[in-house]
């Protein structure tokens, strides 16, 4: 065989191997068959109540049976289309009604209750629970998910694995762990030593809110130390003096300190953020690292810290008419804080005792 021909064949073969993986990209570059945007389903994107709404739809076919059990004060069992067994309670007669496995301390049924439901302690519920009335959970229980049309109350030491929604109030006793989404159409109230990730309600209370003064403060500029600025940009650290009113926004590339009684009528942003007790920010509060908000502060806009956030007792975030969002990787909130809107701890959140 001609050696030159052999070398040519070798190079041709090697070139084909190199070009072959690029053929799909070259075809797409020429004909652009995949130029349309992806059909992304946005139904649950950012909607904390997505799973709760889905569960309501999931059990909608049981409503006629539920109404019949309520009117006749009876109990019914069956199997849902996906194979899960369900239990409908038109009345509640204690532990036996839930068909709890005594040895394992587990309940393997989807529970649909048309009456007030009070669960015993130390039980693991492997499926969802729905109540048309109040739900009162026992101590040290494990729940997959709970939907309560009225009040949902978790006993001390309980754990919620996926989600919960309450039509009126969601309340916890101490030492609960909320690993999923929690929402309420009314109030969420978390006790001390609670762990949480994502909360949403018109009003969220951490511990006893105490003196519930309004977080809404009037815009005043008559303070003798006030300054009128549109936007203040600082390359390093910056400090707003106590009692000073800044009628604008403040941005610092270093550490921003708002002394006690300081007021910023715009937004604040810094690498590290410290609000001393009584400081007020009318706009957003943003830190690219850490943030500490002292006792009795008020902030009306979004509150975001990329790494860690600590909020002291008596602080009010947002208002009922102007809800806000709090977000950080790790959040520690003392008892006595009230938030109107959403709290999202991307890694961990905890309610701690007042220092």
Image (spheres, rainbow, N blue to C red):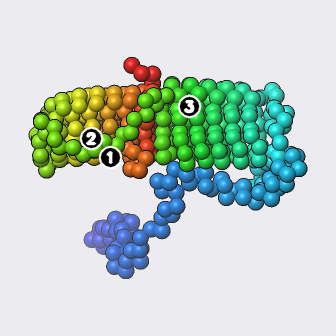
The front one of 113 and 42 is 113
Image coordinates for residue 94, horizontal then vertical, percent: 82, 33
Question: Where residue 301 is drawn, which disc sits there?
Answer: 1
The correct choice, above or below, for 269 with respect to 46 in the image is: above
**Which mark sits nearer the N-terminus, 2 or 3?**
3
Image coordinates for residue 321, horizontal then vertical, percent: 41, 50
Which residue is rendered at x = 59% and y = 41% of the image? 169
Instruction: Using residue 348 as the reference point, say whether residue 99 is left or right of it.
Output: right
Picture quadrant of residue 315: top left
Q: Tell me the residue that label 2 is attached to.
A: 281
Question: Where residue 177 is drawn, which disc sits there?
Answer: 3
Picture quadrant of residue 57: bottom right
Question: Where residue 100 is drawn, which disc sits there?
Answer: none
Which residue is rendered at x = 62% and y = 56% of the image? 54
Label 1: state its secondary structure: loop
Question: Label 1 neighbourhood size at 10 Å, few (<14), some (14-19), many (20+)?
Answer: many
* Residue 83 seen in the current view: yes
Which residue is rendered at x = 80% and y = 53% of the image? 66
The front one of 4 and 173 is 173
Q: Quadrant of the C terminus?
A: top left
Image coordinates for residue 165, horizontal then vertical, percent: 60, 46
In this view, the residue farthest toward the top is 355
Distance from Cα at disc 1 to Cα at disc 3 = 28 Å
């Amino acid at each position: 065989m001609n050696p030159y021909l052999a070398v040519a064949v070798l190079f041709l073969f090697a070139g084909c191997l190199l070009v072959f993986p690029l053929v799909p990209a070259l075809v797409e570059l020429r004909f652009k068959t995949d130029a349309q945007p992806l059909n992304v389903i946005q139904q649950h994107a950012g909607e904390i109540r997505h799973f709760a709404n889905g569960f309501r739809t999931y059990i909608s076919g049981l409503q006629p049976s539920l109404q019949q059990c309520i009117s006749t004060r009876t109990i019914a069992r069956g199997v849902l289309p996906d194979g899960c067994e369900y239990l409908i309670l038109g009345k509640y007669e204690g532990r036996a009604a839930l068909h709890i496995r005594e040895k394992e301390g587990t309940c393997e049924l989807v529970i649909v209750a048309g009456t007030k439901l009070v669960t015993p302690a130390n039980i693991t519920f492997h499926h969802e629970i729905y109540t048309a009335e109040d739900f009162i959970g026992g101590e040290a229980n494990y729940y997959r998910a709970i939907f309560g049309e009225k009040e949902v109350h978790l006993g001390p030491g309980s754990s919620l694995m996926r989600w919960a929604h309450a039509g009126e109030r969601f309340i916890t006793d101490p030492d609960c762990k909320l690993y999923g989404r929690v929402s309420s159409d009314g109030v969420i109230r978390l006790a001390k030593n609670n762990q949480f990730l994502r909360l949403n309600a018109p009003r969220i209370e951490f511990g006893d809110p105490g003196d519930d003064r309004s977080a809404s403060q009037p815009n005043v500029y008559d303070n003798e130390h006030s300054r009128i600025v549109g936007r203040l940009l600082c390359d390093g650290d910056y400090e707003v003096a106590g009692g000073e009113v800044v009628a604008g926004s403040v941005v610092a590339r270093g550490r921003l300190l708002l002394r006690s009684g300081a007021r910023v009528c715009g937004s604040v942003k810094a690498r590290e953020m410290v609000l001393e007790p009584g400081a007020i920010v009318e706009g957003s509060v943003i830190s690219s690292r850490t943030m500490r908000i002292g006792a009795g502060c008020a902030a009306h806009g979004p509150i975001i810290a990329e790494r860690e956030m600590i909020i002291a007792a008596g602080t009010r975030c947002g208002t009922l008419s102007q809800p806000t969002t709090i977000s950080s990787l790790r959040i520690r909130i003392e008892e006595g804080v009230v938030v109107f809107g959403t709290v999202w701890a991307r890694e961990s959140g905890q309610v701690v005792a007042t220092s």
